[in-house]
Image (cartoon, rainbow, N blue to C red):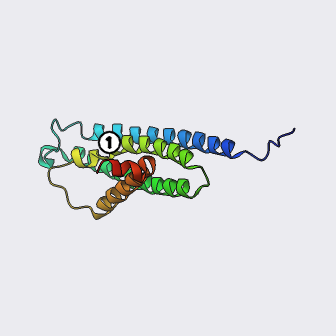
Amino acid sequence: MQIALDSPTPTAAFDKARTGLWTSLQKHLATVYAAEAAYRQAVAFAPDVPFAAAAATADQLDAYGKQRSALRDLFADETTQLDQLTKAIRTKGYAADEKKQLYVLLLGYIDIAASVFALLDSHAPTTLAADDELAETKARFDRVKNFARLNVKGVAGLLVGL
């Protein structure tokens, strides 16, 4: 019996996808952690958070504003990519258990990223102008997280808690 190496088995295709997702999520985590470090550095002047903007110098507020903008943009970009990943997982022809494995990987990343993106609320001036785009990003992020969680837990798992 001879197996053609150029036509991967369904299991090999899934293993490749899982490995690719894992590698990609690690790279994204490195980016998120770097953004977190830069953001925390930008608010290091504030012993308490949220902080009073009047207590900061103009240079400190400028540095903070740049890092906040960078973290906010990263949040929007990551949310868009996570949305695309969940759609890709949903539409691939993997078995249900294989999809669950991919969603579990995604949820691990989402939980870590959520703790970093939460800094946009917790480490901010006490008075901050409304940001509709950020609010929409938060809503989309939560939808993606809930969708992934639903696909891991399943409808039967949700009904048990009722």
Q: Is residue 70 visible?
A: no
Residue that appears at 20% across and 37% down: 45
Residue that appears at 80% across and 41% down: 5
Residue 98 in picture, x, y percent from top left: 56, 45
Q: Residue furthest right?
A: 1
115 with respect to 51 (left or right) = right
Q: Quadrant of residue 60?
A: top left
Residue 94 in picture, x, y percent from top left: 60, 50
Residue receiving disc 1: 115
Looking at this view, is 34 or 80 the one in front? 80
Looking at this view, is 81 or 131 the one in front? 81
Q: Is residue 25 visible?
A: yes
Residue that appears at 39% across and 56% down: 76
Circle 1: is it few (<14), some (14-19), or many (20+) Cα within 10 Å? Answer: few
21 with respect to 135 (left or right) = right
146 with respect to 55 (left or right) = right
Q: Amino acid at mark 1?
A: Ser
44 with respect to 6 (left or right) = left
Q: Quadrant of residue 34?
A: top left
Please identify the quadrant where the N terminus is shown: top right
Looking at this view, is 104 or 82 the one in front? 104
Q: Residue furthest bottom?
A: 132
Residue 22 in picture, x, y percent from top left: 54, 39
Residue that appears at 52% across and 45% down: 102
Residue 39 in picture, x, y percent from top left: 31, 42
- The count of marks equals 1
SS at mark 1?
Answer: helix
